[in-house]
Amino acid sequence: MEKRPRSFYVLAVFFGFFVLFLYGPILTIGILSFQGPKGGLTFPMNGVSTHWFRDLFQEQAVGDIWGAFRRSFGLGLMVMITTVVVSVMAGLAFRKRFYGSGLLFYAAITSLVIPSILISLGVGLIFSQLGLKVHWATSGFGAQLTWTLPFGLLIMFAVFNRFDKSYEEAARDQGATAWQTLRHVVLPIIAPSLIGVALFGFTLSYDEFARTLLTAGSYNTLPLEIFGMTTNVTTPVIYALGTLTTAFSFVIIAAFLLSVWIMGRRRARLGSDAGKGV
Amino acid sequence: MQLRNRHLIGWLEASPLALVLAAFLIAPILMIVIVSFWGATEFSIYPAFQLDNYEFLFSSPVTYRVFGATLKYAFITWALTFAIGFTVAYFLAFHVRSLTMQIALFLVCTIPFWTSNIIRMISWIPFLGRNGIANQTLISWGVIDEPLEWLLYSDFAVILAFVHLYTLFMVVPIFNTMMRIDKSLLEAARDNGANGFQTLVHVILPLTKPGIMIGTIFVVTLVMGDFITVRFMSGSQRANVGRLISNDIGLLQYPSAAATAVVLLCTVMIVIAILLRFVNIRKEL
């Protein structure tokens, strides 16, 4: 192997600092959430305890953390499923280059780059003028979709740009209907990418703040609840909550990545029947 | 017949997306445009067609100052995220040799994207606070005698948080374009006597331009539309357009908020239109 140039080591150190920059702060609050009962918001540690985690599970003076978590989780699942289904359908549609597809594409890009507060404000105004009550499962759900769907669509573009059409043609040549081709050929091939879309759908919804702010109504989602806490909670309990929900995010991400990996392994093992005879 | 079929099925398949965007993107934008001409009393808003909101907006020096501040945040954040993002992507794409390692390190860079922005902001407090890690360290090293006051609740904190939150929006598209550069082009450059730096400037940088543009669009629009990072990291001491809007909302002055939102949207769209002249997004995925 070729000897590494000196620039490699310089850049490797730079990369190391970047990773430290990314993860350092969250590790710090991870450590600080184990503050002793008398500890404050910064170092030094005043003893080590799980006091603040226990505090989270007890009756809270402010807000309803567990209710907010349940709502965020439910909403995340709703957004995830909708994002996967709608993105796949739209991805299939865009392969056909139908009239007006360019316009729809630009609408999706607009949805991605529009300042989030406009969605929040606009949806809030529409609901109030129509005399409807904003609720996380209606207005909040729709507002979040404007953030997750463009990501799903972009992933589908990336997937179908690399998709080998000859698989479909082969299926068609052997007499498969359009639905059979989709069900037994296209979907299994793109399945790992769909897990990716699902990961985006769930996590972006679970952490979404700006577009949910004016559209969630009287029952907060978790990020809104956490933001509310920042203004009136001055104990490490907020770090404990931050640590817990970040750990939860990591578990979710790991589960998704693991399933992609397992699927890849399974496919490598079972994918080809070459040489096995039929 | 075949042709009409294709368009019809295309629209049927795209209809859920089209409906969601119509209801939660297009309609809200139209609503904001309409309401921006309405009037407001202290407690309610009423339909009207008046230009008062825009007149007030454009006659107030605060507006220009705040838009200036917003563009300043966007530009500084763009410059920093570009420098860091390009370097990181360059390292991953050209200096890490095995694909497995590339994917692993790339994931390390992207995982924070799937966690909460609010918590990532909160997590700077123990670092930057008056008695935070940064100040304690600097004092113990003897660099400073007094704690620095400008670390938290300042422009510095705002930009630090922006860079922390959004650098990966640069890393991902730039890395994606870099991975598709034909390695034989680099060999050709080297065979012709280019050194590493010349290859970087004359071969890699021009070929990476689409990725840089996509990253730029993300970072600039995210920063220009932000209101929560500025509010949180500056301790409500700094303003940008997003905060202007959210303050009006807090005071129930929806028409005024809507007018500001319309101007912000136009500004963002102009910036994107300029950037899109340099890149065709659909080809780059």
Image (tube, rainbow, N blue to C red):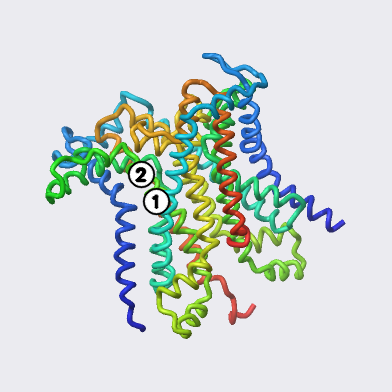
Kindly state the secondary structure of the residue where label 1 is placed.
helix
Which residue type does callout 2 highlight? Arg
Does A75 appear above or below B99?
above
Kindly state the secondary structure of the residue where label 2 is placed.
helix
Identify which residue is drawn at 30% across, 68% down. A10
Does B189 appear above or below B224?
below
B243 or A261: nearer the eye?
A: B243
Query: Badge 2 sits on which subunit?
Result: B
Which residue type does callout 1 highlight? Pro
Task: Say yes or no: labels 1 and 2 on the same chain.
Answer: yes
The reply to whether residue A32 is in sight is: yes
Q: How many marks?
A: 2
- In which quadrant is the C terminus of chain A drawn? bottom right
Identify which residue is drawn at 53% across, 30% down. A215
Identify which residue is drawn at 43% across, 57% down. B82
> Is residue B145 found left or right of A219 in the rendered image?
left
What residue did someone put label 1 on? B112
Q: Give the mark, 1 or 2, whose residue is nearer the N terminus.
A: 1
What residue did someone put label 2 on? B120
The spot of residue B204 in percent (x, y) is 48, 70
- In which quadrant is the N terminus of chain A drawn? bottom left
The spot of residue A221 in percent (x, y) is 45, 33
The spot of residue B167 in percent (x, y) is 41, 53
Within 10 Å of disc 2 (Cα), the crowding (few <14, some 14-19, many 20+) is many
> Is residue A189 found left or right of B124 in the rendered image?
right
The reply to whether residue A245 is in sight is: no
- The reply to whether the C-beta atoms of the residues labelled 1 and 2 are less than 8 Å apart is yes
